[in-house]
Image (cartoon, helix red, strand yellow):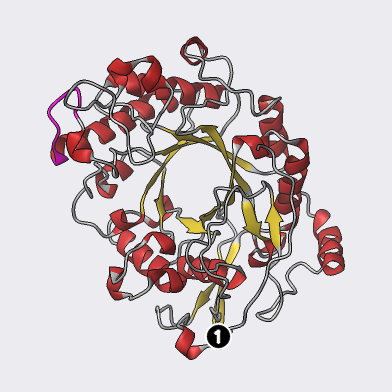
Amino acid sequence: MKKQKLIFFTSLVFIIIGIGCANSATNSRMIILESPQEDLSSTDIAATTVLTDDIKTEKKAKEKYVRGIHLSAWVSGSEKYRNVAAALFNNTELNTAVIDIKEYEGEVYIDGIKIVNLNDAYVKAIPNLEKYIADLKEKGVYTIARIVVFRDNTMTRKNPELAVKNPDGTIWVDRKGVAWLDPYNKNSWDYNLQIAQRAVNIGFEEIQFDYIRFPSDGNTKNCCYSKPHSTVEASKALVGFLKEANKRLKAKDKDAKISIDVFGLTTTASDDMGIGQKIVEMTQWVDYVSPMVYPSHYEKWNYGIVEPNKEPYKIVYYALEGALKRIPNEKLRPWLQDFSLGYKYGKNEVRAQVQACYDNKVGSWLLWNPRCIYTKDALKGQEDENTYQQSDPPTPEMLKTEKSKQPIEEKTEQSTATGLRP
């Protein structure tokens, strides 16, 4: 439990440093946990989302909502940035850390796994990880280990027999030159599950599987697997992996929670989207599902919206509305966008997505930024951790983001940070 006596002190700190006092005419205030490597945004036009004041409060005192942020291994391993993250957990509604334990390059950030060490996949990015997890839990922060499953550029190179192949037998790679483990190969399953089991053993409360899918980009027509590939078999393979994960991670001595990251459109798609992800079938074997409903990742006219990236409320609202027709509310915990890609995102855009969750009676959410840069002005105080406010009525028309309806104000971000890596 977080100590209540911190609330008064937190309020004074917020007043002094001006957190939460930004408006549409001021610069967006950011928490920067890792130095940007490149500019994701192609426009400097500021966001124009307007949140309605006509809201009603819904409180569920007995329910613990999960509201978290993604933390890379390098951020988690830095004492400086641990302190910055701690300030967020202590002073805002955030209560969950999603920490990278295995990434798509195949780097594994947990020691003590024989097969990982034998294949030189271990990277010591997070010193004293076990103690760090214990410290977070002591402060009331829920800990989730994120594991990239089948996209793996290390294990595949060391063990080509585990990789997705080209017709000529060479290792297939995606558009970015990254190799993939064969999702049909149970040795690929076992490798990732050994990492998951180790993460639970050192204290993580939940395992989150990302890239729990088949390849989606590159020349996928050339992909050759260890068994005949089809939509039906692909879906069975992913469900089979999750069944095995459920068996291993929910043993009597473990009982860890399991979650999965899925494409945003899986909430409404009728097929597997060519990647094996069928949200209903997968949900049966996990505790939580996190569709990545980033507006920037939707194409024109998805859900009938001309420019989805400029309509964060509507995209998230429609995506979750669709999800709730197929999976239980208590299992839904979406990833929301706190980064700019083609359109400037700040406080209003982040808050609009959060509001779309609440208007679907979804109280839990996670914020994603690959660089771990978060908009602190979009976060409410610690006292709001287990409450939310719902629009009245909860319709997509409550919040508008069309430029034609709101004045455009240009903003510039003023922030500095020291990078952890070159």
Comparing 325 with 216, the one in front is: 216
Q: Which quadrant of the figure has residue 44?
A: bottom right
Q: Residues within 10 Å of mark 1 (few under 14, many from 20)?
A: few
The residue stretch that appears in magenta:
224-231
Residue annotated with mark 1: 54
Q: Is residue 77 above or below residue 5?
A: above
Give the SS element for disc 1.
Answer: loop
Q: Is residue 211 above or below residue 125?
A: below
**Residue 359 in view of the camera:** no
What is the tally of numbered marks visible in this picture?
Answer: 1
Q: Is residue 22 magenta?
A: no
Comparing 118 with 293, the one in front is: 118
Q: Which quadrant of the figure has residue 323?
A: bottom left
Q: Is residue 45 left or right of residue 382?
A: left
Q: Is residue 417 above or below residue 284?
A: below
Residue 31, percent across and down? 70, 56
Q: Is residue 363 left or right of residue 84?
A: left
Q: Is residue 261 above or below residue 199?
A: below
Comparing 208 with 71, the one in front is: 71
- In the picture, which quadrant includes the C terminus? top right
| Helix, strand or loop: magenta stretch | loop
Q: Is residue 88 left or right of residue 58?
A: right
Q: Is residue 226 magenta?
A: yes
**Residue 242 in view of the camera:** yes
The residue at the point 47 percent across, 31 percent down is 105
Q: Is residue 133 left or right of residue 208?
A: right
Residue 291, percent across and down? 39, 52
The residue at the point 42 percent across, 64 percent down is 295
Residue 204, percent across and down? 57, 32
Tag 1: amino acid: Asp
